[in-house]
């Protein structure tokens, strides 16, 4: 059995060797920043078809979080190509945040398809350091398919609490979902 495990590990190492070489040469990060948005855009189309009912259910209570002005301000962290836009309520003001500026082209396409929303801005920043987003400036923060890729989850949660309206964080719970 240990021989089989060793062989599988060896095969995996050989398959991954080109990626390690590209990373060592400093090429991998720029390659990923450029081509990852293409992949995610296609992936999210299929993913939304499979998860449509679950997403509708998860996002159905978003209007309940609007502030005293009844204007709903939503921040999507790791917005990617904007795959969640169609699930947001009409008239919602959306601020998009992603660490990869190359998503903006795909984001613009989804913004045009979802004209029931108002788009405030696209912010290029890390989820654990969103200093360009004001304290208490958001009613809702959404992040899907992101937590698995951030290096410091507690820092992200701290930033989310900082940008949410104080009334939103009192007694709030962080709900992590796999969808």
Image: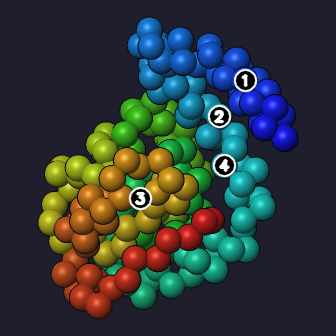
Q: CA distance from mark 3 to mark 1?
A: 40 Å
Asked whether, in this view, residue 79 is left or right of residue 126, the answer is right
Mark closer to the observer (2, 1): 1
Q: Is 22 above or below relative to 144?
A: above
The residue that disc 4 covers is: 44
Asked whether, in this view, residue 155 is left or right of residue 179, the answer is left
Q: Secondary structure at mark 2?
A: helix
Question: Callout 3 environment at 10 Å: few (<14), some (14 to 19), or many (20+)?
Answer: many
The residue that disc 3 covers is: 76
The residue that disc 2 covers is: 39
Q: Secondary structure at mark 1?
A: helix
Q: Quadrant of residue 5?
A: top right
Mark closer to the observer (3, 1): 1
Q: Looking at the figure, which quarter contains the N terminus?
A: top right
Q: CA distance from mark 1 to mark 4?
A: 32 Å
Q: Are marks 4 and 2 in contact (CB under 8 Å)?
A: no
Q: Earlier in the sequence, mark 1 or mark 4?
A: 1
The residue that disc 1 covers is: 10
Q: Position of residue 170 (x, y in %)?
A: 24, 88
Measuring 48% from the left and 18% from the top, which residue is drawn there?
23
Q: Position of residue 142 (x, y in %)?
A: 44, 65
Q: Quadrant of residue 43?
A: top right
Q: CA distance from mark 4 to mark 2?
A: 9 Å
Q: Position of residue 169 (x, y in %)?
A: 26, 82
Q: CA distance from mark 3 to mark 4?
A: 15 Å
Asked whether, in this view, residue 40 is left or right of residue 119, the answer is right
Q: Secondary structure at mark 4?
A: helix
Q: Hey, which residue is sitting farthest bottom in the picture? A: 171
């Amino acid at each position: 059995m240990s021989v089989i495990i060793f062989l599988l590990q060896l095969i995996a190492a050989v398959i991954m060797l080109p990626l390690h070489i590209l990373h060592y040469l400093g090429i991998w990060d720029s390659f990923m920043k450029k081509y990852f948005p293409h992949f995610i855009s296609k992936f999210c189309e299929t993913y939304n078809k499979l998860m449509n009912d679950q997403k509708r259910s998860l996002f159905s209570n978003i209007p309940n979080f609007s502030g005293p002005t009844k204007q709903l301000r939503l921040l999507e962290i790791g917005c990617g190509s904007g795959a969640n836009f169609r699930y947001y309520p009409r008239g919602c003001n959306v601020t998009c945040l992603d660490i990869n500026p190359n998503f903006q082209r795909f984001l613009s396409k989804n913004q045009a398809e979802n004209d029931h929303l108002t788009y405030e801005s696209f912010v290029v920043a890390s989820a654990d350091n969103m200093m360009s987003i004001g304290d208490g400036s958001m009613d809702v923060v959404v992040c899907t398919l992101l937590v698995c890729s951030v290096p410091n989850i507690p820092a992200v949660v701290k930033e989310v609490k900082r940008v949410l309206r104080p009334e939103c964080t009192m007694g709030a719970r962080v709900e992590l979902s796999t969808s």
